[in-house]
Image (cartoon, rainbow, N blue to C red):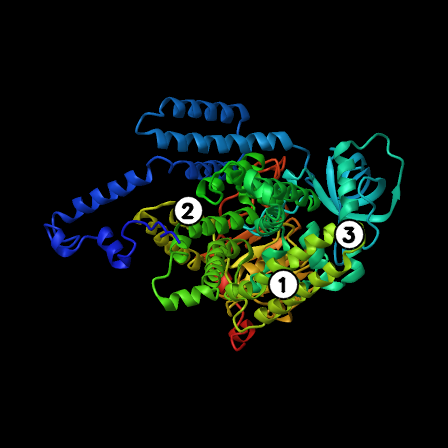
Amino acid sequence: MAEPVRPPGWRRGIAGVMADVWPPRGALAGGWPGIGAGAWPSFAAKLRSWASEEAGAGRLLPWVPVAFGAGIALYFSADHEPVLWIAAVTAGLLCLVAALMRRHRLFPAAVMMAAAASGFAVATVKTARVAHPVLARPLYSVSLSGFVEARDIRERSDRIVLRVNSMESQRNAITLTRVRLAVRKGTAPDVGSFVQLKARLLPPLAPVRPGSYDFARDMFFQGIGASGFVMGAISAQPPPQEGGFALRYAATMQGLRDAIDARIRARLSGDERAIATALLTGRRDAITPDVNDAMFISGLGHVLSISGYHMAVVAGVVFFAVRALLALIPGLTVSHPIKKWAAAAALVAAALYLLLSGAEVATQRSFFMTAVVLIAVMVDRRAVTFRTLAVAAMIVLIAAPEALVHPSFQMSFAATLGLVALVQFGLPRLFATPDSSTTQRIALWGGRELAMLLLASLIAGLATTPYAAFHFHRITPYGVLANLAAMPVVSALVMPAGLLGLMAAPFGLDGVWWMLMGWGIDWMIAVTRWVAALPGAVGRMAAFGIGPLVLGSLGLILIGLLRTPLRWSGALMLAAATLWAAAAPLPDILISGDGRAVAVRGGDGRLHVMRSGKDVFATREWLAADADARLPADSSLGDGVSCDEAGCVVAMADGRLVAMALRADALADDCARAALIVTTRAAPSSCAAGVIDRPRLQQQGALMLTRQGRGFAVTPVRAAGSDRPWAPAPPDATEFEPTLVPRAPASRVQDATPPESEQGVDD
C-alpha cells in the first residue's frame, strides 16, 4: 500500500505549531513579546507572511460567496427598499473595476467589494421580480375564487395555497395574488381544482418580538400576501381559464405524493407513517407534537426536513448500486467510465427526489450542493472541496437570495463547511497508515469509521449550535449521542428501504420495504425519546441580538477557510460571541403587536403575562426567548396578575405597576396608579402614565421595553422610517421617541407601589 502524503512537519505536533506561532525566548532579540523591542516586529512579519499565504493563488474563490452573502445581508438590513437601477449600476461598475485590477495587489479587495455589491443588487432584483400586494389590515369576510396550488395535510387541520382569481370585500382596496388558508381537517380540495369560498384574511405574521423570525418576509418571497382560514363550505367550480403548466405539474406531483402516502399508510400508521412520508415527500406536518419535540430536543430534528443529508443518501445509494451493477460486467469495467455513468444516474435520482419532495428552497439548496459534487466526479475533479461548497453556495444565493436569512440555509452550510474542513484537514491524518499494531487492529475493527462518524456528528453539531441557539433558543447537549445511535440506522436501513419501496411500488412489491423502513423509524423514535428524557437534555438559551451571531459566523468561516495559524483567530471570535450572547440583557416588558398580550418581568425574575385573547403563539415565543420552560397554559404565568372585566394590572420588579386597559372606564384609575398603560383605547391627554396605544402598535408592531431609571427604552419590531415590501409602513406613520418616560411624578409612582405582601416576595 502506498505511503499516504502527509503535510510537512506532521510529526511535530502541537509543540511545533506553537513554535511557529510564537518564537521561543531565545529566538527574539529583545526577549518575550511585550517586553523586548524585537518581538513585535518579528510577530508582525509573521502575520504578514500568513496573510500573504492566505491571499495566494486558489484561495480567493471560497471567499466570494461570503462577500456575496454579506451584500445580501446588508440588503435585508436596509430601512427602505433600495433604488433598483442604482444598486445594479453600482454592482456593474465595481465588477468592471475588479476585472481591470486583476493584476493589481488590491485585486482581492476589489473582488470582495464587487461580490458584496452584486449580492446587494441580486437581492434587490429578486424582490422587484416577486413584488405583489400584501394585506395591511384584517378582512373578516372575503369572497375568494381561484386555483388550489398546494395542499398540506396537518395533524389538526389542513392548509391550502390559493392563487386568487377574484376577490370581493367591502373594505378591500387591493386584489391579492396568493393567500394561504387553513381548512377543516379532511376538507382540503385537490391541487389544481378551481374553488369558491369565504375566508377571514389576516396580514402576514410579523415578528412577535424585536429580533425574532420574520414570517412575513418568508411569505412575501413565496408570493403569498395574506393568511387566514376558510369560513363555511368550499365549493368546486368550473375554471374560467386554464391553470397553466405549473399548476398541472403541481397537481401531478401532489397526486404522486398522495399515492406514495397511501401505499405507506397501508403498512404503517401514526408517527411511523408520518416520518416515512416526511422523508420521501417532504410532507411533515402530521407528526405528533411530542415526537416532533423529542426529535428537536435530541438533535435529530434535521432528519425531518429534507436537506443535504437526504440528498446525499439518495445520490450515494444510487451511485454505489449502479456502479456495483456495472462492475459485474467485465467489459464495461475495462473500457468504459462506469464511475461517471453512476454519477449521472445519481444526479437523475437526486433530481427526481427534488421534484417529489416539492422543490422548496431548502431542498433546492441541497440538490445544488449534491449536483455540484456529482458533476465534479463526472469531469474528473475532486468532489468534496471548499470550491465545491463555494459554487453551490453561489448558485443558491443567486437563485434565492432570501435563503441567506433562513435558518435551514445557515445551519446546512455551517455544518457542510465544518464537514468539508474535516475532509480536507482531518481525514488525511485519520486514514493515514497506522504506525503500531494496536492502532492497526483498532482500524481493522472499524475504529476509523467510528471515529469519523463521531467527529462528523460533533463538528456538524458544534457548527450549527449558534444558529439553533439564535433561531430556536435551544441547544442539544446530547446531539452527538443521538446521532451516533440513530443515524447509522437511518442511513443504512430507513432511507435505502424507502428508495426500494418507491421502485417496487409500481410492481406491487413494496410492502416489505415499508415494513423495514418502519422498523428503522421505530428505532429512531426510541432513541429520540430516550435522549430527550435524559437529565439536562433540554438546553435552553435566552434570546440574543444579531451581533453575536454575525461574529460567531465569521469565526466559523475563518476556522473553516483559513489554512495558516490565523484560523485560530476564528476561535477567539467564537469565544467572544459566546460571551456576548450570554451577557445579552433580558427585557422587562414585552407587548404583542395587537396589544392583546403583555408580559412583565416580576420580582421573581420571570415573566408574568396579561392576556385578553386566545392566541398563545406570542406567549410561547416569549417564553422560549426567555429560556423559560413553562408552557403558555401554565398557571404560574398569571401569578401576581390581577384582572377584571375592565383590564389587568401587574407589578414589575421595582414595584411599579403595568396596566392593560380593556375599557375606557379603566383608564382613569390606571392613569393615576400605573407607570405604564397598554391599551387599544384612546387615553386622555392628562394621563400621568406612559401610554402604549393602538396607533403606536400599528406603526411599530410588537415592542420590547427595558427599564432605564424611571423610564423605559423602547425597541420596536418596525423602526422609524422602515418601509419594506413585506412590511410596508402605515400610510399615517409618525415617528415615536425611542425612550418612553412615564409622565407620573416620582412621588406619585412611589405612592402607587404596592406593599411587599402584594408583590409576591414570599413566593
Give the amino acid type for the residue marked by disc 3 in the picture. Ala
Q: Could one spot residue 624 in this view of the protein? A: yes
- Badge 1 marks a residue whose secondary structure is helix
Give the amino acid type for the residue marked by disc 2 in the picture. Ile
Badge 1 density bin: few <14, some 14–19, many ≥20, Cα 10 Å: some
Residue 564, position as x, y percentages in the image: 31, 47
Residue 599 higher or lower than 682, as above or below:
below
Label 3–label 2 contact, CB within 8 A: no
Residue 368, position as x, y percentages in the image: 57, 40
The tag earlier along the polypeptide, 3 or 2, is: 3
- Which residue carries the number 1 mark? 293
- Which residue carries the number 2 mark? 557
Frontmost residue, 710 versus 569: 569
**Mark 1 vs mark 2, CA separation in Å:** 30 Å
The tag earlier along the polypeptide, 3 or 1, is: 1
- Which residue carries the number 3 mark? 505
Label 3–label 1 contact, CB within 8 A: no
Q: Residue at x 77, y 54 (%)?
A: 261
> On residue 454, which mark appears?
none
Badge 3 density bin: few <14, some 14–19, many ≥20, Cα 10 Å: some
Residue 537, position as x, y percentages in the image: 54, 69
Locate residue 300 relative to residue 585 in the image: left or right.
right
Q: Could one spot residue 668 in this view of the protein? A: no
Frontmost residue, 630 versus 596: 630
